[in-house]
Image (cartoon, rainbow, N blue to C red):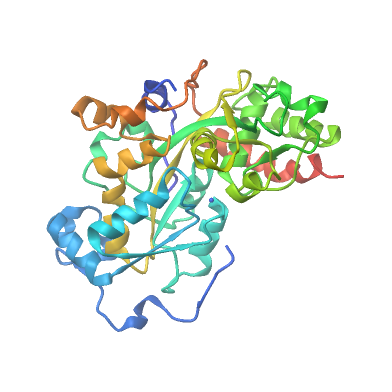
Amino acid sequence: MTLHRARAAAFAAVLTAAALSLTACGSAGSTAAGSGDAPAKAGGKAAKDATSAADFGGMDALVAAAKKEGKLHVITLPKDWANYGKLMDGFKAKYGIDIEDENPDGTSQDEINAVTSRKGQDRAPDVLDLGTAFAQSAGAQGLLAPYKVADFDKIPASMKNADGLSYNDYGGYVSIGCDAKKVSACPQSFADLLKPDYKGMVALNGNPTKAAAALSAVWAASLANGGSLDDIQPGIDFFGKLKQAGNFNPVEVTPATIEKGETPITVDWSYLNTGYTDKFKDKGIDWKVAIPSDGSYAQYYNQAINKWAPHPAAARLWEEYLYSAEGQNGFLGGYATPALFDAMKSAGTLDAAAAAKLPAVTKPFTTFPTQAQTDAAKKTVTENWAKAIAG
């Protein structure tokens, strides 16, 4: 089943309300049934078939089933990405369930590859955190299990698959990060990035054919250079010009590359770049962040459960945790806008102090790409990216 991704005003409201990622690792020989334990039951159903906590007989029964499994396998979740480190620590402290975080610097495509290559194995990922294009692909391939968290009805319709195959979790804007101690004048726009002052400095978070962060950066560059949601090619051409000018840096951004000075200018999500401002302050790095004035683009990531999750009850409990007030405020604490921002604001459960720290946006992005536009953009980038930055 394909995912419903009409990006309408309800979707934009959450981002604008605040003014605003495999090669298998480890053992792959055993299977999910290898422990010898009977599959957890949910109200008479196997946990893998539960579509809500009610199928378990309520949250207490879900918690008990998840604790019995005792493990949760997540994938490509860097601890400094949208506050995932604290979220994983909070989940473990609350439920006593161990979390294995595999390939934290991987991509959305790596996640899908892990699902397909490890089907039926106990080292398969239980849950996924995917960029929109990749969530659509996973849904279309039949890789996701439908599940509706307790507050599913509070997630705007345009931000979720109606059947619960996936739903937005947190979002942010494409931004430009800059080490002000290594760069004489930090860029404020995509046009600025072409200046000769930035030789070998401008890097992306991943490869846009595999990573949603990089794909979104190319889309933002397209909007800044006469492109549209129907035409991402100007963004590819822009990075080709950066390459020809000698400004494009092929090193893929991580916190380590920033700390080492390898990637002094990064085009990345606002919540990551803003988080680096705090992370590196004590290390003498003056990290500045700007939402590009000529290419405003925002997106959400999406939560989903592997259809063949080896720990199906823990997977469902993880989703309940992420969409609780504690989990959503956790994302907010990492400078990301949570999907339930507006609902929590109305209910008085939003962390107002954390919300006040979200980066300001002068040109809110209000029209989001449809599934067809996203599929077309991904296809164009896949076909043309390598040639654009070759040489």
> Could one spot residue 369 in this view of the protein?
no
- Looking at the image, which residue is at 52% across and 63% down? 114
Q: Position of residue 110 (x, y in %)?
A: 56, 57
> Could one spot residue 264 in this view of the protein?
yes
| Depth order, front residue of 369/246 | 246
| Depth order, front residue of 293/391 | 293
- Looking at the image, which residue is at 52% across and 32% down? 270
The part of the image, by quadrant, that contains residue 168 is: top left
Indicate left or right for 293 with 36 as reference.
right
Vertical side of 387 occupied by 31: above or below:
below
Considering the image in quadrants, where does the C terminus appear? top right
Indicate left or right for 3 with 51 as reference.
right
Tally of marks: 0
Vertical side of 249 occupied by 292: above or below:
above
Q: Position of residue 308 (x, y in %)?
A: 39, 65
- Looking at the image, which residue is at 56% across and 55% down? 106
Indicate left or right for 183 with 164 as reference.
right
